[in-house]
Image (cartoon, rainbow, N blue to C red):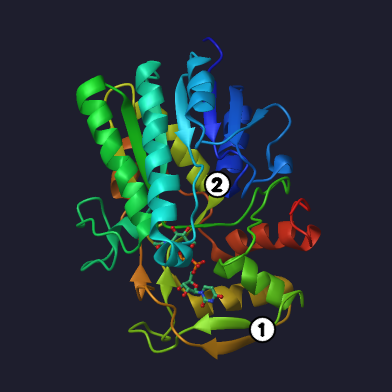
Amino acid sequence: MSRKRYLVTGGAGFVGSHVVAALLERNADVVVLDNLSIGHRAAVLPGAELVVGDLADPSAVDALVGAGPWDAVFHFAALSLVGESVRLPFKYLLENGVNGIRLIDACVRHAVPRFVLSSTANLFGTPDRMPIDEEVRIDPASPYGESKFMIERALHWANEIHGLRSACLRYFNAAGADPQGRLGEDHNPETHLIPLAIDAVLGRRPALAIFGSDYATPDGTCIRDYVHVNDLADAHIRVLDQLDRRSVRYNVGTGQGYSVRDITEAVGRIAGRPVPYVMGQPRMGDAAILIAGAEALRADTGWIPQFTDLDEVVATAYRWREAHPGGYGDK
Ligand code: UD1
């Protein structure tokens, strides 16, 4: 079999870097396009080529996509702060939505056969049933979710009219880190629960604020579906085979929900001491419960999450963060 060649936008970011690692493990040639505004040079493992460039630069994107052939383009590069998107909707609609659509246009013009999109469960807003399968009505909760939906719609037409096959993967809560300790989660600012709880227990930040304790859940705190980033990466690889026949869209999660309290307790168990916390106000736009119905992905691709134990997920994140007090150290 000839060696596969992939272009990965945003491959220096959290999920993208773990997918690059998985592609390298499969002996593929990988080129990463990243402007390093959120991503990190050190998150691109040796073996992959990093091109520092911006999706907002159509001629640079066109030149790179034209320098194929590519077996597939993976698209991760995006802004992903839900709260920021509610303040600055057009930043998200333009930088995520429009730049993503331009990338698809370049893929169509240069006859890229397959496209894999990093999408989000934010597409489903406040769903009326749980777990959330692919038939739940789409009603994005934020301009961030809307920007991903814009790209999903463009991919629909790229498939219908030009035959570009695509997979849209709607992640629930990406969590954990490379079990080999090479890669981890390093956002600036950090807004995600698990890294914040870890920093709080390590004494690197003040106490964690738990956003609301009166939700309609057993312990009153929000429930989410935390899927290990290596399991997410595996889903990206598995959908490639589907794309030989058709375009697909899958919700990606474990089907198991954990509350904010479950997470703080797990972090406390791993650290060997409790996470200091204070009760804060609910965060605008947070749904009480978001759990994935990922049966379609399992049935079609044989995907089975390997990280089913919450403590194991948290432990991989903890190990990386403890060993990297300044993250990748470039911001
Ligand atoms: C959402 C988005 C995701 C996006 C992410 C980052 C959905 C379904 N997912 O995930 O696509 O990438 O935001 O912006 O919309 N929490 C606290 N205290 C904190 C931080 C978080 O209590 O300091 C709670 C939140 O209220 C939430 C849970 O922890 O219930 C997880 O929060 P977070 O890690 O920010 O992810 P989501 O908001 O679920």
Nearer-the-camera pick, 215 or 311? 215
Residue at position x 35%, y 36% in the image? 167
Circles 2, 1 touching at the beta carbon (< 8 Å)? no
Nearer-the-camera pick, 225 or 162? 162
Circle on res. 207: 1
Residue at position x 20%, y 27% in the image? 160
Circle on res. 27: none
User: Secondary structure beneath disc 2?
Assistant: helix
Q: Residue 2: horizontal and vertical position, in percent?
A: 53, 10
Q: Residue furthest top?
A: 2
**On the rendered structure, is 143 left or right of 69?**
left
Q: Residue 132: horizontal and vertical position, in percent?
A: 28, 59
Disc 2 marks a residue whose amino acid type is Val
Q: Residue 149: horizontal and vertical position, in percent?
A: 31, 48
**Eyeballing the image, is 312 above or below 281?**
above
**Eyeballing the image, is 62 above or below 103?**
above
Q: Residue 7: horizontal and vertical position, in percent?
A: 53, 26
Q: Quadrant of residue 287?
A: bottom left
Circle on res. 15: 2
